[in-house]
């Protein structure tokens, strides 16, 4: 790799043969990088690039702008040299601005060993990170049961009483999920900003079910004579689409390391204090670095936890200093909440769906969104709440686990505890 650094000083005029380049177009590369069926032969590689975020004024020929990010020509040459040295194909690349790392998605040839390629790349001291492309899935599913108790979860958590103290006003919640129906009567003007990081594979935004359902739980309008009420109806959502439906019009959705990394990086830059990730997958080193940066910056990260059913797909809920949320199930089911997790109602919860509709949805995705909404209420009262303070408030307000009843967080109790030390109007 040291030889690669000499590229900075070589006079290109003395090169007699052009560097080998891939024939793949940028659009084809992104399509391949986003295809979860091909994930087992995709790698994410990163190396430090001190020029990331450097102003463009000094040498405009050296730097180019890619969306909101800046990437150096040097890093592009290094990434191409890696492709040639290790006989892998470069699909797409981008600078991960918040951690100063240039990232590349490579494809390993079908006849080559992925594990051997990772081992070889890992031995390169100038490469800081190399990993498989991981696939993540959202954690909710639709139910066919008839409507029975509209928004029973709101009564369980005493949201009505909590709204006399706070409604989430002035708080932004960053959500990484699928798209959101921006024209839904309960969500109009509730999304302050939205961005799609999976445009090449799923350009639609407003017809996605999972993200629309999660958005409704958190920020559905109140007192608009329509539909339901969100946990934090006066909060605003910053919606990042990094996941896409696994099938057309499906609640289930998938994402991968590439799209999630882009979304987390943008969420950090947004300045939002809350990051909702109603999804889970295998441990991911790229995402761990980014989420640790988010946590270091004071962002409260909330993620879905499938508990004993999660096996090895419980990241990022398993990450230290991430709030891990499980769905409460009925007491006659074989379900235990692990010690490090919090719980909230997640069975047959009424929420928004595309085209102005509603339905009952279940899963830890729903519980995660509920806790994100409650945290927005707490932050309205005390905007500088730390992760530790937030977790303590939520733990102190958990409902007792009595036989035949639900456990979970009492939002009104959490706010009442906070109001003892903070000003509540």
Image (cartoon, rainbow, N blue to C red):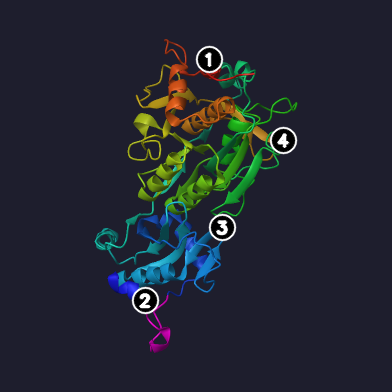
Circle 3/circle 4 CB separation < 8 Å:
no
Is residue 16 found inside the magenta-colored segment of the image? yes
Q: Does 91 appear above or below 408?
A: below
Identity of the residue drawn at 41% across and 35% down: 322
The rendered magenta stretch, by its main secondary structure, is classed as loop
Note whether residue 243 is visible.
no
Q: Which residue is mark 4?
A: 185
**Category of crowding for the residue at label 3, using alpha-carbon neighbours closer than 10 angstroms: few (below 14), some (14–19), many (at least 20):** few
Residue closest to the eye, 324 or 296: 296
Cα–Cα gap, marks 3 and 4: 31 Å
Distance in Å between CA atoms under marks 1 and 2: 62 Å
| x and y, in percent, of residue 257 in the image | 42, 51
Residue 228 is left or right of residue 344, and the answer is right
Q: Give yes or no for residue 332 being in the magenta stretch.
A: no
Quadrant where the N terminus is found in the figure = bottom left
- Mark 4 → mark 1, Cα distance in angstroms: 37 Å
Q: Secondary structure at mark 2?
A: helix
Contact check, label 4 and label 1, Cβ < 8 Å: no
Q: Work out whether mark 3 precedes mark 4 in sequence or the reverse, and give the earlier one.
A: 3
Disc 2: which residue: 7
Q: For mark 1, what is the residue?
A: 420
User: Toward which corner of the image does residue 43 lie, by quadrant?
Assistant: bottom left
**Pointer 3 residue:** 68
Position of 235 with respect to 40 (left or right) is right
Magenta stretch, residue numbers: 7-21
Tell me if mark 1 has few (under 14), some (14-19) or many (20+) residues whose alpha carbon lies within 10 angstroms of its own.
Answer: few
> In the image, is residue 329 above or below residue 401?
below
């Amino acid at each position: 790799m040291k030889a690669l650094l000499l590229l900075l000083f070589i006079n290109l005029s003395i090169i007699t043969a052009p560097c080998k380049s891939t024939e793949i177009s940028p659009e084809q590369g992104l399509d391949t990088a986003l295809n979860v069926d091909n994930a087992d032969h995709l790698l994410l590689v990163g190396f430090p690039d001190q020029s990331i975020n450097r102003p463009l004024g000094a040498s405009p020929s050296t730097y180019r702008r890619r969306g909101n990010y800046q990437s150096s020509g040097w890093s592009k040459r290094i990434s191409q040299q890696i492709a040639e040295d290790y006989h892998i194909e470069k699909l797409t690349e981008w600078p991960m601005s918040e951690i100063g790392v240039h990232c590349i998605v490579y494809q390993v040839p079908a006849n080559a060993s992925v594990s051997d390629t990772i081992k070889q790349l890992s031995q390169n001291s100038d490469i800081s990170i190399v990993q498989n492309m991981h696939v993540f899935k959202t954690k909710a599913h639709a139910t066919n049961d008839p409507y029975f108790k509209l928004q029973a979860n709101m009564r369980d958590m005493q949201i009505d009483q909590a709204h006399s103290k706070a409604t989430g006003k002035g708080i932004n919640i960053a959500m990484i999920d699928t798209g959101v129906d921006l024209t839904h009567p309960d969500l109009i003007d509730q999304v302050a900003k939205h961005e799609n990081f999976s445009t090449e594979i799923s350009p639609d935004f407003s017809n996605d079910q999972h993200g629309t359902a999660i958005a409704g739980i958190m920020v559905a309008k109140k007192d608009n004579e329509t539909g339901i009420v969100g946990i934090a109806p006066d909060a605003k959502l910053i919606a990042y689409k990094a996941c896409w439906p696994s099938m057309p019009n499906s609640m289930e959705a998938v994402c991968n390391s590439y799209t999630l990394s882009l979304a987390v990086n943008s969420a950090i830059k947004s300045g939002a204090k809350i990051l909702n990730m109603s999804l889970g997958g295998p441990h991911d080193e790229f995402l761990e670095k980014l989420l640790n940066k988010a946590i270091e910056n004071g962002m409260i990260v909330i993620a879905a936890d499938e508990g004993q059913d999660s096996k090895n797909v419980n990241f990022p809920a398993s990450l230290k200093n991430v709030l891990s949320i499980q769905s409460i199930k009925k007491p006659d089911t074989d379900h235990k909440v692990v010690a490090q997790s919090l719980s909230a109602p997640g069975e047959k919860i009424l929420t928004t769906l595309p085209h102005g509709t509603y339905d009952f949805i279940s899963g830890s995705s729903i519980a995660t969104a509920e806790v994100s909404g409650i945290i927005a209420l707490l932050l309205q009262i005390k905007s500088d709440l730390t992760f530790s303070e937030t977790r303590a408030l939520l733990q102190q307000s958990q409902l007792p686990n009595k036989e035949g009843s639900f456990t979970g967080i009492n939002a009104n109790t959490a706010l009442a505890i906070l109001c003892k030390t903070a000003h509540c109007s």
